[in-house]
Amino acid sequence: MARYILVASKDDPASVNMFKTLLNTYPFKEHQTSIGDKAYRWGPMTLIIFSRELLELDNIDQELGMLGENHYYVFLSRHESEAKIPSLLVHTPGNWTSHSPYGGKPYEICICPSLLMKKVLLKISRNIRELSEKWRFGMEVTHHGPYLQSPAIFIEIGSTEEEWTDKQASNVLIHSLVDVLMEYNHDLGVQYPFIIGIGGPHYAPSFNRIALETDVAVSHVIPSYALEADFRYEMIIKAIRRSLGRFASIVLDWKGLRAHHREKILNFLGERSIKTMKVKELLR
């Protein structure tokens, strides 16, 4: 049976908003913890609250002694962006290059629970109707820390103090998450095959459509900007290995990739007989 470790930070206003929603809505009981400030448990969920930034919590699964593919970590976080668009977002943490300015380790990515991420995204797509029309939702590409050996996702409220402390937004995001987690153990036998996405911008519009509109789960997405840095093509293989479920294909956002990147990717994958597709083949 899967266990879910919900990780929150007192230093993050959106995280505080979300853990208060959890404690005020569901019958969590205080629980002893070896790390963190406070811990609570209810059903398959354990909530752990820290006084540190979430991006600094590398290897907390090892510190807790709760690691492996049956332990899913969900980080409750704020999202910041220059566009300041009110948004509810999900993604898996990880770094595609040698640069790790926002936590994690160079060239390391967490295990992506693509089925869980797809189901949370679908649930948000229905529940976001409770918010005003200014709100957006979606999946981001894999980025930033921390690094864990266990499956992990972030759920985020963006993008300014006004949204981080919005109680209704927190209700929508937390209720979406909890509904999925309470159903998820029964859904593990209904696995969608997963794809790895390559190309396009940070907010991955093409891969969001695939996650929402097809019978495929989207695992790690490698954005075009990562390919412009010191990217190693072996990271594509790591993305497949660091995903839960049955691999279907590498899917390329063809128009979102430069020609020389497309050529290198196709040569690399062709030499290894790894299936590739274009986004438009899934979104016909």
Image (cartoon, rainbow, N blue to C red):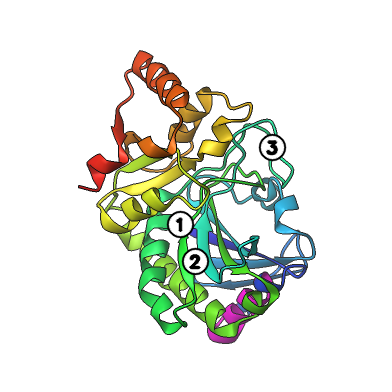
* Residue position marked by numbered label 3 in the rendering: 105
Rendered residue at 74%/43% (across/down): 101
- On the image, which quarter does residue 73 sit in? bottom right
Helix, strand or loop at disc 3?
A: loop
Give the magenta part as a residue range.
Answer: 15-28
Helix, strand or loop at disc 1?
A: loop
Q: Which three-letter amino acid code belongs to the residue tagged 2?
A: Pro
* Residue position marked by numbered label 1 in the rendering: 2
Q: CA distance from mark 1 to mark 3?
A: 26 Å
Q: Say few, some or many: other residues with alpha carbon within 10 Å of mark 2 (under 14 / 14 to 19 / 20 or more).
A: some
Question: Residues at badges 1 and 3 in contact (C-beta under 8 Å)?
Answer: no
Q: Is residue 26 magenta?
A: yes
Rendered residue at 67%/46% (across/down): 62
Question: Residues at badges 1 and 2 in contact (C-beta under 8 Å)?
Answer: yes
The residue nearer to you, when weighing 50 against 171, is 171
What label does residue 44 carry, if any? 2
Residue 30 can be seen, yes or no: no
- On the image, which quarter does residue 259 sit in? top left
Q: CA distance from mark 3 to mark 2?
A: 29 Å
In the image, residue 176 sits, relative to residue 166, either above or below, namely above
Q: Position of residue 129 (x, y in %)?
A: 39, 80
Rendered residue at 48%/34% (across/down): 239
Helix, strand or loop at disc 2?
A: loop
Q: Is residue 108 magenta?
A: no
N-terminal-most mark, 1 or 2: 1
The residue nearer to you, when weighing 106 against 178, is 106
